[in-house]
Image: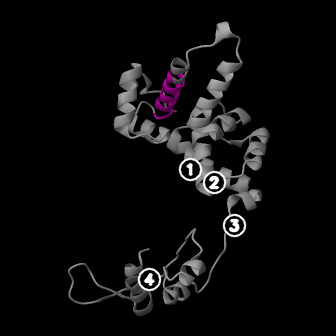
């Protein structure tokens, strides 16, 4: 939060009053604040980029939540929680993560923390074809677009010279397959498919046109 805004929040917390934009008198409010941060506020206070009085006023009760890499025993519960939310959104009925898939989750360091876990599980759900997320599903999801491209290049380099395909064509096929899979999960609804793929609707539409995909073919594909 910018330093110049912090006194306003401090006033709201201490005096339980705010002023509307363009208002001429303070309004009484009743509030309780639950704040979260990934910053070291004590360091920011020492650097004078966060007000000490606001820090102590907000820090009446604090809970330190370690990063996911330091509490991997939470992975099964978190995975079950996220899959409950992902199932209706993606249009699948996943019961959980297989033992081998869970082992891969435990072996990963999770630099993106819990948000990355939710993203990986949703990405895996999009390409999954069963009722459990398998090790193969998790592996594809963990690789992501950039690493997947790298793997394609490596695989092509390892083939005999007469079987090396065109890298551009291979990547185009991968892109098309992912778009089709997302459209199937979204029942042909392009807005939902774009969200699943992490694209804007306009960007997805351009790719659909490029690949000659007919979204109407998947209007009844969602379960």
Task: Tell me whether circle 2 and circle 3 mark residues in contact (CB < 8 Å).
Answer: no
Mark 3 secondary-structure assignment: loop
User: Of circles 1 and 3, which is in front?
Assistant: 3
Does 2 sit above or below residue 150? below
In the structure shown, which secondary structural element does the residue marked by tag 4 occupy? loop
Find out whether the residues at labels 1 and 2 contact each other: C-beta distance under 8 Å: yes
Horizontal side of residue 78 vs 174, given as left or right: right
Q: What is the quadrant of residue 25 in the picture?
A: bottom left
Residue at horizontal 52 percent and vertical 38 percent from the top: 91
The residue carrying pointer 1 sits among few (fewer than 14), some (14 to 19) or many (20 or more) residues within 10 Å by Cα, namely few
**Sequence-first tag of 2 and 3:** 3
At 34% from the left and 36% from the top, the residue drawn is: 202
Q: Which residue is mark 1?
A: 85
Q: In the image, which is nearer the foreground, mark 2 or mark 3?
A: 3
Which residue is denoted by mark 3 in the rendering?
66
Q: Nearer the viewer, residue 176 or 45?
A: 45
| Residue at image mark 4 | 31
Q: Residue furthest bottom?
A: 15
Q: Give the CA separation, mark 4 to mark 1.
A: 29 Å
Where residue 147 appears, x then y in whole percent? 62, 35
On screen, residue 138 above or below 83: above
Q: Which residues are magenta?
A: 172-186
- Could you tell me which residue is drawn at 56 percent across and 50 percent down? 85
Position of residue 32 relative to residue 183, above or below, is: below
Occupied quadrant, residue 207: top left
Judging depth in this view, the residue of 198 and 160 nearest the camera is: 160
Distance from label 1 to label 3 (Cα)? Answer: 23 Å
Q: Where residue 212 sits in the image (x, y, percent)?
A: 39, 19
At numbered mark 2, what does the secondary structure look like: helix, strand or loop? helix
Q: Which mark is residue 81?
A: 2
Task: State whether the magenta stretch is mostly helix, strand or loop.
Answer: helix
């Amino acid at each position: 939060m910018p330093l110049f805004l912090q006194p306003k929040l401090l006033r709201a917390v201490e005096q339980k009053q705010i002023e509307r934009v363009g208002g001429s008198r303070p309004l009484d409010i009743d509030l309780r604040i639950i704040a979260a941060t990934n910053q070291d506020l004590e360091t920011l206070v020492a650097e004078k980029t966060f007000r000490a009085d606001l820090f102590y006023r907000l820090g009446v009760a604090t809970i330190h939540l370690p990063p996911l890499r330091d509490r991997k025993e939470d992975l099964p519960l978190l995975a079950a929680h996220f899959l409950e939310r992902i199932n209706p959104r993606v249009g699948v009925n996943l019961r959980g993560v297989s033992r081998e898939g869970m082992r891969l989750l435990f072996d990963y360091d999770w630099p993106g923390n819990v948000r990355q876990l939710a993203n990986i599980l949703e990405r895996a759900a999009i390409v999954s074809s069963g009722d459990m997320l398998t090790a193969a599903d998790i592996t594809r999801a963990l690789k992501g677009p950039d690493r997947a491209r790298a793997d394609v290049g490596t695989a092509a380099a390892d083939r005999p010279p007469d079987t090396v395909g065109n890298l551009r064509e291979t990547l185009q096929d991968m892109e098309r397959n992912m778009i089709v899979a997302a459209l199937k999960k979204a029942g042909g609804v392009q807005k939902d498919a774009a969200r699943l793929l992490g694209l804007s609707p306009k960007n997805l539409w351009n790719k659909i046109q490029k690949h000659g995909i007919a979204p109407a073919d998947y209007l009844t594909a969602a379960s």
